[in-house]
Image (cartoon, rainbow, N blue to C red):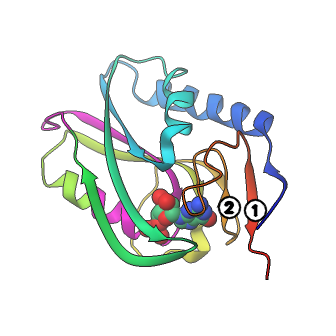
């Protein structure tokens, strides 16, 4: 396995996270937000961004998975659901990466059925060229080409999540 040099550096990531937080703070001014971190992937992005968002908020988590190693299995599993009742609340989902969009479409449809006041998506990375699901993304950190990336919460085989930057993953053949 080869981890190359950073594709997105710590400095680029932290600058963009603050910009996104500022935009979210402006958009939700006067409202209370229920921020939902989608785990495991958003475990770094989520605390980084919410600490810069300047509106009152509650925090919740949802654990879901869809990938087996570097290939999608197509199956989405919710391992742990929200603890909060989201009816009538402004819900903002924080995801690490949207690739096919199937995971988030599944989660969004599941949560929309619970009648939140609003339901938006903030993703750290967007791989738009691989999209299969019809899904609107409200806030995007970085749009990237179709590489398999690791770091900043993103794994290969549950490893590399702790890297503070994003790197392109290559398997040694
Ligand atoms: P989707 O359902 O949008 O195809 O996939 C979403 C999930 O697949 C993400 O939450 C992430 O766990 C995983 N995933 C998609 N692309 C990548 C990637 O480039 N690197 C890693 N590590 N995971 C990815």
Labels 1 & 2 near each other (Cβ < 8 A): yes
Q: Nearer the viewer, residue 140 or 65?
A: 65
* Residue 134, quarter of the rendered image: bottom left
Question: In the image, which residues are magenta?
Answer: 83-108
Circle 2 is placed at which residue position?
A: 149
Position of residue 41 measured from the top left corner of the image (x, y, whole percent): 50, 49
Residue closest to the eye, 23 or 121: 121
Residue at x 26% of width, y 41% of height: 118
Q: Going 20% across and 33% down the picture, which residue do you hit?
A: 89
Local crowd size for mark 1, using a 10 Å CA cut-off: few (<14), some (14–19), many (≥20): some
Q: Secondary structure at mark 2?
A: strand
90 left or right of 26 in image: left
Name the residue beneath numbered marker 1: 168
Is 90 magenta? The answer is: yes
Mark 1 or mark 2, earlier in chain: 2
Report if the beta carbon of the residue with label 2 is closer than 8 angstroms to ligand 1: yes
In the rendering, at what x and y percent does residue 116 appear?
A: 18, 42
Q: Quadrant of residue 55?
A: top left
Q: Position of residue 26 (x, y in %)?
A: 49, 25
The quadrant of the rendering that contains the N terminus is: bottom right
**Residue 104 appears in the figure:** yes
Q: Is residue 8 left or right of residue 83?
A: right
138 or 155, nearer to the observer: 155
Q: Quadrant of residue 57?
A: top left
Q: Is residue 140 magenta?
A: no
**Residue 132 seen anywhere in this rendered image of the structure:** no
Residue pushed farthest right?
5
**How would you rate the neighbour count of disc 2 (Cα within 10 Å): few for under 14, some for 14-19, many for 20 or more?**
many
Secondary structure beneath dot 1 equals strand
């Amino acid at each position: 396995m080869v981890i190359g040099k950073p594709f997105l550096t710590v400095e680029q990531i932290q600058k963009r996270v603050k910009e996104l937080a500022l935009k979210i703070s402006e958009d939700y001014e006067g409202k209370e937000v229920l921020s939902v971190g989608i785990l495991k992937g958003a475990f770094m992005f989520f605390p980084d961004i919410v600490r810069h968002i300047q509106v009152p908020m509650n925090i919740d988590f949802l654990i879901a998975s869809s990938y087996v190693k570097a290939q999608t299995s197509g199956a989405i599993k919710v391992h742990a659901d929200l603890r909060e009742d989201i009816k009538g609340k402004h819900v903002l989902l924080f995801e690490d990466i949207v690739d096919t969009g199937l995971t988030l479409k599944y989660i969004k449809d599941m949560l929309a059925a619970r009648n939140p006041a609003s339901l938006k998506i903030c993703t750290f990375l967007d791989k738009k060229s691989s999209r299969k699901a019809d899904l609107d993304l409200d806030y995007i950190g970085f749009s990237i080409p179709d590489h398999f990336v690791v770091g900043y919460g993103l794994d290969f085989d549950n490893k590399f999540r702790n890297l503070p930057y994003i790197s392109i993953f290559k398997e040694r053949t």
